[in-house]
Image (cartoon, rainbow, N blue to C red):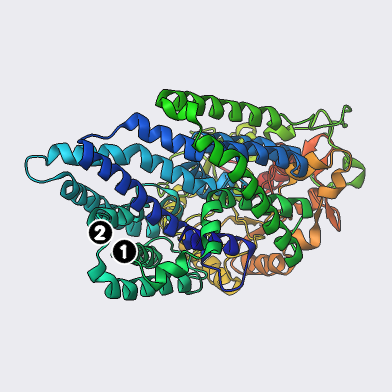
Amino acid sequence: MRGLAVTMVVLYHVGMPGFAGGFVGVDVFFVISGYLITGLLTRELVQTGRISLATFYARRIRRLLPAAALVAVATFALARLVLPPLSLLDLRRDVLATLSYLSNYWFAVRNTDYLQGHLAASPYQQYWSLAVEEQFYLVWPALLIGATLLLRRLTDARTAGRIAVGAVAVGSFALCVVVTVDAQPWAFFGLPTRAWELAAGGLVALTLGGGARAAGRPAGQVVGLLGLAVVLVTPSLLAGRLDFPGWAAAVPVGGAVALIASGCVGRGPLQAVLGWRGLTLLGALSYSIYLWHWPFLVLAEAAHDGPLSWAARLGVLAATVLAAWLTYLFVEQPLRHQAWLSRRPRRTVGFGAAATVGAAGLALLLAVPPALHLDRPAQTVALAGAQTGAEPDRWTTYVPDNLRPPLRRAGDDFPVVFRDGCHSGFRDVEVHDCVYGKPDAAQTVVLFGDSHAAQWFPPLRAIAEARGLRLVSLTKSGCPTAEVTKYTSFFLRDYWECTQWRHRAIARIVAEKPALVLVANGTNATGRDRVPDDKWWAGMNVMFDRLGPVRNVTVLADTPYADGDVPVCLSAHLSDATACAVQRSTGINLPFTRAEAALVQRRGGRYLDLNDHICGPRICPAIIGDILVYIDRHHLSPEVTTWLREPLDQYVAAHVRPAGAL
């Protein structure tokens, strides 16, 4: 079964047709682990009346830690050879979360953090399931011991275990279904929402694990064949399924439970097939194969700078099997059965602590990047003029040592509204009472939109302070101002929080009676998160309708989108910043921009396009003077928007009448 499970996972990751749902191999692993660990603990509890926690954890450490630590360090060493230097800084957090067995929650955070949406797939992401199992090992002995002590006067240890494990299975499954609908990444990565899969295996151990029953063999074979069929068809059955685990996870879990139950009631032809030497060899190597295959694939694609050919993928698979075999022979087996460590659990615990700290130290040492700039400055640029475009002689073709912000902290250089609680995150539906500039001023300017509106906050705040205006900032991550139902890839569902927030924000704008509303949205986005154009036009019309009496509405044209993370690109091209420039033809959706401008003008609004200040006719540079233009793939740096203060100030001055003016 382990051989089948790891094969499904690996074929899914290499993109094999028919295995688009092969991620369910992990669910099969969970059921197997639940069965084995529950059976092991229960037998000890029944036979001795206790569970030796020290011995149990020592066995787990010797079984899992050596290979996990080896692959973690080797992954970082390989990453240093192929990834851009700046990526290594992000990778540090991944490896520390991995070695602390918290990577499942770290990746749940990463997958739901809008500000980290630019990060590529981590070569450590496969460790999430290992973290789930390690957390399971921490709580499961206590659950069985607690249930036995609590119910010792009413029933035996095995029945007490069934009650406790059954309760966990029911509660965790219900939680899984609910959380999958609302926050899929947390359901996918979390132990509370995955515990029912481990508990399902545990229930088999507690119910049928007492020994084979020959009388049940024919029925068991039928059940097992059905289970095998379910496991084998699930990868194609669940292809493209995004609402996973949820209800859908019951399919592979049910198949795995049926397979194990079949073996528990007696051996037959099915068990002979599953005992085939090739499958059992894959099963023996499955742990190391699982650890090695993902970083090999991710780093090979990074080195190739794109998807791999089938020949290359087969080469990666061959390297995976070889690395797994060597790891099994020279790391897994020797340390698992090492006599000196095995004699005293405390020795194993000490070894595990030392190995973890040592691996973390090595990874951090490997993570220290070289200098992320050349040893020469660039000319400091003055504020952009009101009519001045992006002149090529201002473009810097290397990464200077006076770059603002430095590459090392570019990814965290978001405007202050992201830190002071005024920019609404994904979950937030409240419209915060955030007022800047001169709070008691008679004239109010409102900034309204998503994070591409928030990027204009720094210059608008400076303008409001200089001109004595009241600035109200109403921005929310990934939330368009157009009245549309948007899908969010962070939660893999419709973004209902956006709809609620938008309605409240528009009501606030109408109540403010502002002198000027500046609207901005990330409309140059591509992929599934992008709203279809026809729905966008309808939604913008509804927005204007709801704004009603608010007449002075200006829509800012969206800024360019790069093909990848610009600071990361620059860290790999210190002497050739032009390699990270954005092609204007691909970074800006010009037909959309023209159509949006026409719609806004028909509705009595104005359209302001500042892209000529940061782009030439064909190229949008990555660095202008000493200013970094982008902090990720598509957000402008506060430094560059502040540099654009003058043309924005001229616009505000022209369209906000002084208080009392007729």
Residue 260 occupies which quadrant of the picture? Answer: bottom left
Nearer-the-camera pick, 295 or 204: 204
Q: Specify whether residue 384 is in view.
A: no
CB contact under 8 Å: marks 1 and 2: yes
Nearer-the-camera pick, 660 or 64: 64
User: In the image, is residue 338 above or below residue 26?
Assistant: above
Q: Specify whether residue 96 is in view.
A: yes
Query: Label 1 to label 2, Cα distance in Å?
Result: 7 Å
For label 1, the residue is 261
Q: Dot 1 lies on which element? A: helix
Q: Residue at x 75, y 37 (%)?
A: 85
Side of 43 where 481 appears, left or right: right
Q: Residue furthest left?
A: 153
Side of 80 where 1 appears, left or right: left
Q: Residues within 10 Å of mark 1 (few under 14, many from 20)?
A: many
Residue 385 drawn at (x, y percent): 81, 42
Nearer-the-camera pick, 447 or 259: 259
Q: Residues within 10 Å of mark 2 (few under 14, many from 20)?
A: some
For label 2, the residue is 208
Q: Residue at x 27, y 37 (%)?
A: 142
User: In the image, is residue 636 above or below residue 188?
Assistant: above
Residue 355, labelled with which disc? none
Residue 394 drawn at (x, y percent): 88, 41
Q: Residue at x 46, y 59 (%)?
A: 495
Instruction: Tell me which amino acid carries mark 2.
Output: Leu
Side of 207 where 316 appears, left or right: right
Q: Earlier in the sequence, mark 1 or mark 2?
A: 2
User: In the image, is residue 200 above or below residue 88?
Assistant: below
Residue 625 drawn at (x, y percent): 85, 37
Q: Dot 2 lies on which element? A: helix
Residue 387 drawn at (x, y percent): 82, 48
